[in-house]
Image (cartoon, rainbow, N blue to C red):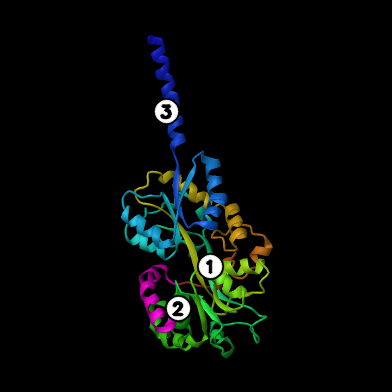
Amino acid sequence: MKRICMALAALALVLTPMQASAQDKLVVSVWGGSWRDMVDNLIGKKFTAATGVPVEYITGGTIDRLNKEKLAKGNPESDITFTTSHVCWLYANDGLYEQLDLAKVANAKNLVAQAKISPYHIGTWAYVYTIGYRPDLIKGAAFESWADLWRPEVKGKLAAPDFDPSHLIVVAALLSGGDAATWEKGQAKLKELKPSFKAFYTNDANSQQLIANGETPVQVILSMNAHYMAGEGVPIELVIPKEGAVLGIDTVAIMKGSKKAELAYKFINVALDPQVQAEVAKFKKGSPVVLDAKLDPAIAKLPGVFTSVDQWNKQAIIIDHKLRAEKTAEWRKWFAENIMN
């Protein structure tokens, strides 16, 4: 009997670590749909293959996920969060992020300077909001400058996002001798653009529909959406104006209170793997954030896909991410009252 008990005890010692490992998981917060699928297929599966640890996803809208984490402060729902470069500051300012130790992320050594957002979060891929237009429906010269949006032939044909007016607010300020911090300088210029608007789109699908059916043949458009529509046969041209295109970067961070920080670092390292970065660029037609990613030449030549330091420095308008977080509500209010109404 004693021998049987000893054997069972020994067996329990062997099985316990295996059971703990089987129950282990990393929880990642990300947008739903194709974004969740991309993270899972290109990053999550590779992470699991390397570590044996499964990945579980929490999905939802940008602000919905932020509000949930605020309520769960100190006991986060997720271990890792993907969000935009300015919204991530709302997490950081509320004490929801751990400070990153990039020494634990070997692939971060090739991170572009523009992707080093803060001590708490770094970029994972990038895109631009810029001018997209239908040359079959808009005659005349190509759009070489943001100022071309004010041309008479654009009247009643322009669309822009209703959820984030920061692109046009900053562009109008730049054209008026200001910048994001002195955005008021562009208010009069932006009001002059009001007759050009036909619609304000609410999401990616709405943007794609409006330009595909020709209702708004000119848009301030997400580069990824424009490239997707071109792939669907829509005759759309995407341009980088001489002033540059407004940069957007999605970021990753480790939640404060996570008990899986070491696994989280491994996940982030996979996300920055140059091969993974090239696959992300191919799937979403966006910019890799590491300089050693080898892109398909057909992807690398697309407008808004940056593969060199020179492109990052010369073709991107960067709105200070922290300032953008602080000003977003004020900008949306002003834009709704003065431009959309």
Residues in magenta, as a range: 319-341
* Residue 229, magenta (yes or no): no
The count of marks equals: 3
Asked whether the viewer can see residue 48, the reply is yes
Upstream in the sequence, badge 1 or badge 3? Answer: 3
Which residue is at a point 37% across and 77% down the rendered structure image? 333
Amino acid, disc 3: Thr
Q: What number is the disc on residue 16?
A: 3
Q: How far apart in space, not on screen, are marks 3 and 2 (Cα)?
A: 57 Å
Q: Determine the image quadrant of residue 239.
A: bottom right
Find numbered disc 3 in the image and state the secondary structure of the residue it sits on: helix
Q: Quadrant of the C terminus?
A: bottom left
Do the CB atoms of the residues marked 1 and 2 lie less than 8 Å apart?
no
Looking at the picture, how far across and down is residue 117, in whole percent? 44, 62
Which residue is at a point 38% across and 81% down the rendered structure image? 337
Q: Quadrant of the N terminus?
A: top left
Upstream in the sequence, badge 1 or badge 2? Answer: 2
In the picture, measured across the screen, residue 79 lies left or right of residue 134, that is: left
Amino acid, disc 1: Asp
Amino acid, disc 2: Val
Residue occupied by mark 2: 170
